[in-house]
Image (spheres, helix red, strand yellow):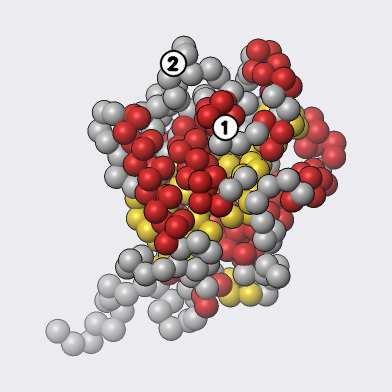
Amino acid sequence: MENLPYLTHEAKFKDSGIHRASELLKRWGNETVEGLGLIGVPLSKPSISHSGASFAPETIRKMMNAFTTYSIQQDTDLIASSITDFGDILMHVTNLEESHRRIESSIETILQSSPSMKPIFLGGDHSITAPIVKAFQRVHGKVGIIQFDAHHDLCNLEDGGPSNGTPFRQLIEHGAIQGKHLYQIGIRDFSNGKVYSDYAKENGVTVYPMSDVYQRGITAILKDIIAKLQKEVEIIYVSLDMDVMDQAYAPGCPAIGPGGMDSQMIIEAISLLSKEPSVCGMDIVEIDPTLDFRDMTSRLAAYSVLTFLMGFGRRN
Ligand code: CA
């Protein structure tokens, strides 16, 4: 049929030069990768509360379509950049420890074959950070961690096994990291027990509660941490639990609450960390798309990935 020039399966604004951020994701084809990588870790069964965080990698990828590739603040279009999408790690249906083993061994293999690639992991719940960091430690040596979180995640393993409440204690007790190389930012009132705060102190973990973030500012705190870690570790790993955000900005987290960070604070933090050459990986965890409102939390995650890509391109 003729004379239907407006009927199309193509994207809107086809010829206008506007690109969607989803175009930046390039499917991995077994090649050695440099630059940024994306790896989905869809595991939420070790979550203490009900969680659909296993749906997050797919939703965050979809939300890349909600943004363009152009930054007005940097007057830069990211379309010449790319992120290699490795896909998702297949989880065992019932065996949590087997799922953790698959995460650890897959990431170790990827890091060995692409040693200069910097991965962003899309969780999943926070339990995934333990096997990820173990893989980093084996491949790269001493790891320092900057953790954004409302919670310490220092629960003991005896009472409930490896869950989303235990990853950092697991790493310390396993010897994969030292407590003094763990920096926790955004820990909130009425969300933790004193016993975990005591454990942090006894093990040399540095804790910045939300009051510190408000008073000192996130940039000053991060600059201090980076200066200290750089003298002591081979690489820095960033773990972003979205529940560090105030509930107004991240309604899709299983553990929401007031008094957290706002979007601008976390974007400022990621922008700074992405430019830092010692930062070799980051995870974004604890988003449950089934609880979210208009995918607000997954949108923030996608925006965080883009912010990281922008800063990464500006590394010296
Ligand atoms: Ca957490």
Residue 163 in the image: above or below residue 21: above
Residue labelled with disc 2? 160
Q: Secondary structure at mark 1?
A: loop
Measure the alpha-carbon separation of dots 2 and 1: 20 Å
Q: Position of residue 128 (x, y in %)?
A: 45, 37
Looking at this view, is 99 or 243 the one in front?
A: 99
Residue 55, by quadrant, is top left
Amino acid found under the numbered disc labelled 1: Gly
Q: Secondary structure at mark 2?
A: loop
Let me know if residue 22 appears in the view: no
Residue 17 in the image: above or below residue 104: below
Marking on residue 29: none
Amino acid found under the numbered disc labelled 2: Gly
Q: Are marks 2 and 1 in contact (CB under 8 Å)?
A: no
Residue labelled with disc 1? 175
Residue 305, by quadrant, is bottom right
Mark 1 crowd level (few <14, some 14–19, many ≥20, 10 Å Cα): few
What residue appears at the point 67 percent right and 61 percent down from the top-left corner?
Answer: 277
First reached walking from the N terminus: tag 2 or tag 1? 2
Residue 184, by quadrant, is top right
Looking at this view, is 293 or 53 the one in front?
A: 53
22 sits to left or right of 4: right
What residue appears at the point 40 percent right and 27 percent down from the top-left corner?
Answer: 46
Residue at the left extreme, as displayed: 1
Residue at the bottom extreme, as displayed: 2
Q: Is mark 1 within 8 Å of ligand 1?
A: no
Residue 257 in the image: above or below residue 233: above
Q: Position of residue 126 (x, y in %)?
A: 49, 34
136 sits to left or right of 40: right
What residue appears at the point 40 percent right and 79 percent down from the top-left corner?
Answer: 14
What residue appears at the point 74 percent right and 31 percent down from the top-left corner?
Answer: 206
